[in-house]
Amino acid sequence: MSSSFVVVYAHVVGAILVVGYCLFWAVMTTAARRQFASADALRFLRAARSAAWPLPGKKPTLALIGWLLLIFVAVAGVLCLPDGFSMGRLISGERFSTLLSIKLVLSAALVACFPWLGVSRVPLAIASLGLALAVVVTSTLLVR
Amino acid sequence: MSVYRVSIALHLIAVALWFGHMLFWSLIAGLALKKVAPPETAATLRRLSMTMGGLGWPSLAVLAITGYLLLGFRGITFETLLSGRAFAAPGGFVLAAKLALVAWMIFYQAVFGHKAAPRAIYLNMAAALAIVALSVLLVRPVLLYS
């Protein structure tokens, strides 16, 4: 099995997990804001954000896991750029397409939403999920 | 946007939501929320996280319809699937393995659904991850050899 396959596969699985992470906060935020008063909802959401994944040793919180997943997907995404698609040529605009520009804008918007997941109101949590799905769709259309 | 692109978009949205939900809840959120203290807060958080379920069947429906349409763009129909001609083409074994795993996931959804299935759930997640790998190979067979 080639390393290219492993990198593409890691990118795709990572992206699926990022969608799962955004879906998780959309569900939690909607449910908490509907069922509790604002202060209680925020208390529960903060408890969820700081819930630690039971790894031996240092235990990352859910919020940190979200960032780690996002970084993992971005790094794998850069690694699976096709031959001749260097970052230099990308930044210079030589290999820019409308779809790629849309993907980058959507990705930037998703990154901007990330710090507010779990402490925001419902619309932002749902918008983050929409952005994550839109990035997945534009990425797939880019390679077709 | 063409039918082809809309089918791809819907297929990807369904798979990302369903597999994302399954993998993130089972492998990350479920384990983390269990350990929250005090236990009453953990129970409330788990209850909140379970307020939306039932993604399996709607996702499967979207995946089946869009998957069939996408196979059609490759010249694969029910007839070529049933006759086995679809599997004789290059990459046919990848398609056969993917469809077998999809059949397993439909079986799992029908038999276990939302019931507790501590061992089968891991088999189901393994099947989901294998389907993603096989799908990547179907779209980019060159990755196997590059």
Image: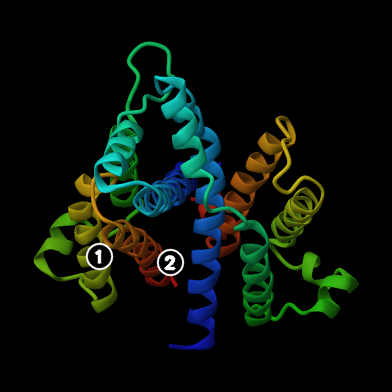
**Disc 1: host chain:** A
At a point 79% along the width and 65% down the height, the residue shown is B87
**Disc 2: host chain:** A
- On the image, numbered disc 2 is attached to which residue? A140
Q: Which mark is residue A106?
A: 1
Badge nearest the viewer, 2 or 1: 1
In the shown orientation, is residue A68 left or right of residue B19?
Answer: left
Q: Amino acid at mark 2?
A: Thr
Q: CA distance from mark 2 to mark 1?
A: 14 Å
Question: What is the residue that sits farthest to the top in this orientation?
Answer: A57
Q: Residues within 10 Å of mark 2 (few under 14, many from 20)?
A: some
**Tags 2 and 1 both on a single chain:** yes
At a point 51% along the width and 33% down the height, the residue shown is B30
Seen in the picture, residue A114 relative to B29 is either above or below; the reply is: below
Quadrant into which the N terminus of chain B falls: bottom left
In the shown orientation, is residue A84 left or right of residue B84?
Answer: left
Seen in the picture, residue A54 relative to B97 is either above or below; the reply is: above
At a point 49% along the width and 25% down the height, the residue shown is B34
Q: Secondary structure at mark 2?
A: helix
Pick the front one: A40 or B69? A40
Q: Amino acid at mark 1?
A: Leu
Q: Earlier in the sequence, mark 2 or mark 1?
A: 1
Pick the front one: B42 or A4? B42
Q: Residues within 10 Å of mark 1 (few under 14, many from 20)?
A: many
x and y, in percent, of residue B96 in the image: 77, 58
